Amino acid sequence: MEIWYHPENREVLSRLATAAFDAKEWFDLKTAAERLSLLDGFDRLLSLETLDIQLFQHQEQAVRKVLQEMRGRAILADEVGLGKTIEAGVILKEYVLRGLVQRVLILVPASLVGQWRSELKEKLDLDFSVARTPRDFEAAKIVASIDTAKRPVHREIIQRTPWDLVIVDEAHRLRNSRTLNWKFVNGIQKKYLLLLTATPIQNDLRELYNLVTLLKPGQLKTFTQFKRAYMLDKHSPKNTYRLREALKEVLVRTSRQETLIPFPRRQVISVAVAMERPERAFYDETLALLRAAYRAMPHDKKNLLPLILVLRQCSSHPAIALATLQAMCRRGTLPAVNPDALASLNACASGLVPGKLELLLQKARSLEEPAIVYTEFRASQREIAKTLREAGLIVHLFHGGMTPAEREQAVLRFRSEGGIMVSTEAGGEGHNFQFCRHVINYDLPWNPMRIEQRIGRVHRLGQEREVQVINLVTEKSIDAYVLYLLEKKIGMFEKVIGEVDAILANVEASFEERLAHAALASQSDDEMKARIEAFGREIERASAAYERVKRLNAELLGS
């Protein structure tokens, strides 16, 4: 390691010449000198030397630019799917290794808290805790949802604490300076700040001004001056070359075309299987029962989760839906359900093997390579594993009840032995499976982001082969409508990972709630279909709006 001293420090040089240091003085001087060398220009990325990670060229360029030119305050605005998270993580690690950062606050959407924490540990060897209570927010390195962090009791703790580095994911949610989100982040004491968003501008050019002001007040002068220099109207920029030059001091953006990274093709196969008469009878009776329970609920219809759970389980395995209904009735969760209805359902479900499970077995037997099968439920996982093992297939389990060490061992066995990994949603976060290229969705979550996370564990930077995604659904079930919306209205399986969330952010209420009300509030299948179609048209409008946002960001940011 090169050690250097300021040339004017004659006393140090003189004492070095005469060896006039005792052991402690020499140790202190050497340590200080090494730190000075580490601070010298970030020419070496220590994180890449100490960790088993490799950055793509565009990622390393972004990291160096933020460290060397932007002094740790930047908008990381690479297009969706190009690895902004790992860029932010390496910047963080670099500062930690150099002793420049001790206290770190990472603010993300609630759905990404676990993913951020696990990737920081697995890829960067950084231990972060998830903050949910006031005491949690006293820790030195925390990940929290921004909605939890901005609660008054937590906001007061955060804003009185001097943070070395703050990272905000999905930072376009800070676009309005009049919102609590913007004021909250602006009020945090912070030395370094990283804002991650693929679309810094959503609708109005003022949003870009507000984000830049968080990082570097005055960079774009006053808003009046910014408006006069760069805006034809709130949607239309002018003098784009000059604006891009001004943004280069605070914003890093790479387009997919610029990277020249060959993303493998994704083949999507959706297969629908008809229900045999006993399974259809069970499904129809259960849906009628749930609709009656829905009508009996209070007017606000707030507690839909029990009904949603049973409805989703009906499309997974009748036996587990029945077991859940029976448990709810014992606890009094569904007072509108009478014992006679349960007895009838019990008769329908006796010995019933769902058609989707038989179809899964056919698909699993036909594959000559490892595959991941995703299910929503532990009970379904057990039934799937039993069926596949009885057919002589190698089966591995992965679920949230396993310890981290057990999960790691399961992944290692799957990698070395092949076969089928049957996973709950726990396998959709944290671990990456680029050694596998087949994903089978036995159950389709009602949250599209979870489907993206599943596919993203396989179809991501580093995957070198074509990826095959197989979606299994039963005909004329709510899952078939879910697939219809995903494929025909969102175009999900053709979208880059991350784009679906941006589209659904502009849809009223959650995807799951809209589906539940469509299924349960309807008196007939025709009415349910009409409600689903109306929801689909709303999604199409949101998708068109997102495409306009993409074009605006590409025009202004030069992608």
Image (cartoon, rainbow, N blue to C red):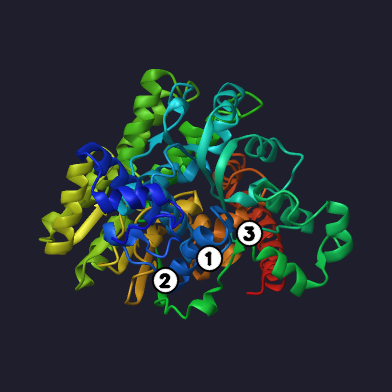
> Is 495 positioned to the left or the right of 140 in the image?
right
Q: Residue 56 location, x and y as percent? A: 40, 71
Q: Is residue 274 visible?
A: no
Q: Work out whether 376 lies above or below 265.
A: above
Q: Residue at x 88, y 54 (%)?
A: 224
The disc placed on residue 469 is: none
Q: Earlier in the sequence, mark 3 or mark 2?
A: 3
Camera-nearest residue between 533 and 56: 56
Q: Are marks 1 and 2 in contact (CB under 8 Å)?
A: yes
Nearest to viewer (mark 3 / mark 2)? 3
- The residue identified by callout 2 is 268
Query: Label 3, label 1: how many angstroms apart (C-alpha)?
Result: 37 Å
Q: CA distance from mark 3 to mark 2?
A: 39 Å
Identify the residue under disc 3: 250
Residue at label 1? 487
Identity, as a three-letter code, of the amino acid under mark 3: Val
Q: Give, as a three-letter code, the residue at label 2.
A: Val
Callout 1: helix, strand or loop? helix
Residue 437, x across and y down, in percent: 30, 69
Q: CA distance from mark 1 to mark 2?
A: 10 Å
Q: Amino acid at mark 1?
A: Glu
Near-viewer residue (200 or 216): 216
Residue 130, image x, y percentages: 41, 34
Residue in the foreground of this view, choosing between 153 and 315:
153
Label 3 secondary element: loop
- Tell me if residue 275 comes above or below residue 556 in the rendering: above
Badge 2 density bin: few <14, some 14–19, many ≥20, Cα 10 Å: some
